[in-house]
Image (cartoon, rainbow, N blue to C red):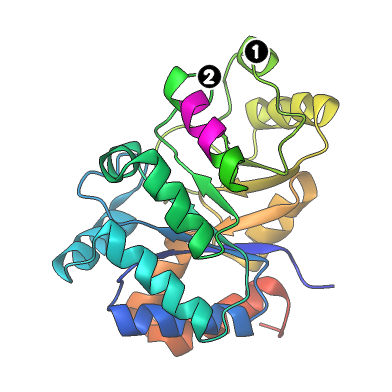
Amino acid sequence: MKNKIMTHVIAGYPTEIQCIKLLFSMQAAGVFAIEVQIPFSDPNADGPTIMKANDIALGNAMTTRKSFELIHRSREKGLTTPIYIMSYANKLFNFGIKNFCQESKRCHVTGLIIPDLPFDSPEYQELLTTCLDFGIELVPVLSPGMAPSRLNKYDINHQALLYLTSTRGITGKELAINTELLKLVKKIRSISSAQLALGFGIRTPKDVEKALKIADIAVIGSGVIEVIQTGGIVGANNYIKQLTGSTTS
């Protein structure tokens, strides 16, 4: 059985055409899902690797609307892998909640991940209502150290997927499976049957193995971008195959 891997791309990176090729390369490598990030000038949950990729995508004139068109063209060309759009709240609200959800549905997007929108905020609840109207999942982002009382206030029983960060702070750090994270996983497992996607710091097959001992899906973000920078799409394809278990390292 292949490892369940969710890979991360930035729409328009390294170029619009290469990004589409990368999506199909990831599909061919057997990833479980792809997280497509709408590029933003101030991605405060991201480390330097993904921040630089955001800057390059923005330099390629990639906008929110163009990001949706990139996904839509990929669907028309035969991309069937589930897609989760990752966007910062600023981009989403500027585009308009209803418009964002309409475009997501048109592009057959499975769900949205908004890392800087607390799941217990009024804005999140407003977005959740609209997502449900359009049949789009809204995936809450949970971090180690969060108070259990916050989880108790939010009904996660209806969730199909929950996104966990292995550590507090930004992406790109080393994988850290510590007591705080294990406590959070235990708490979630006790109240929800949702699949858990674990991200932040997962780069190697050993990292994937560790992550999948406590989560259902391993999210690879900075690691993919780093390989693209050095080995291009071919290098990324080989790298992802190793992580999914489609080939031996």
Image quadrant where one finds the N terminus:
bottom right
Residue found at x 76% / y 23%? 187
Q: Position of residue 203 (x, y in %)?
A: 54, 62
Q: Is residue 55 left or right of residue 115?
A: left
Secondary element at image label 2: loop
Image quadrant where one finds the C terminus:
bottom right
Secondary element at image label 1: helix
Which amino acid does the dot numbered 1 rest on? Answer: Lys
Name the residue tied to disc 2: 120
Viewer-closest of 9 and 169: 9
Number of disc labels: 2
Q: Position of residue 142 (x, y in %)?
A: 57, 31
Name the residue tied to disc 1: 153
Residue bounds of the magenta highlight:
124-130
> Distance from label 1 to label 2 (Cα)?
8 Å
Badge 1: residue crowd in 10 Å (few <14, some 14–19, many ≥20): few
Residue found at x 40% / y 49%? 100
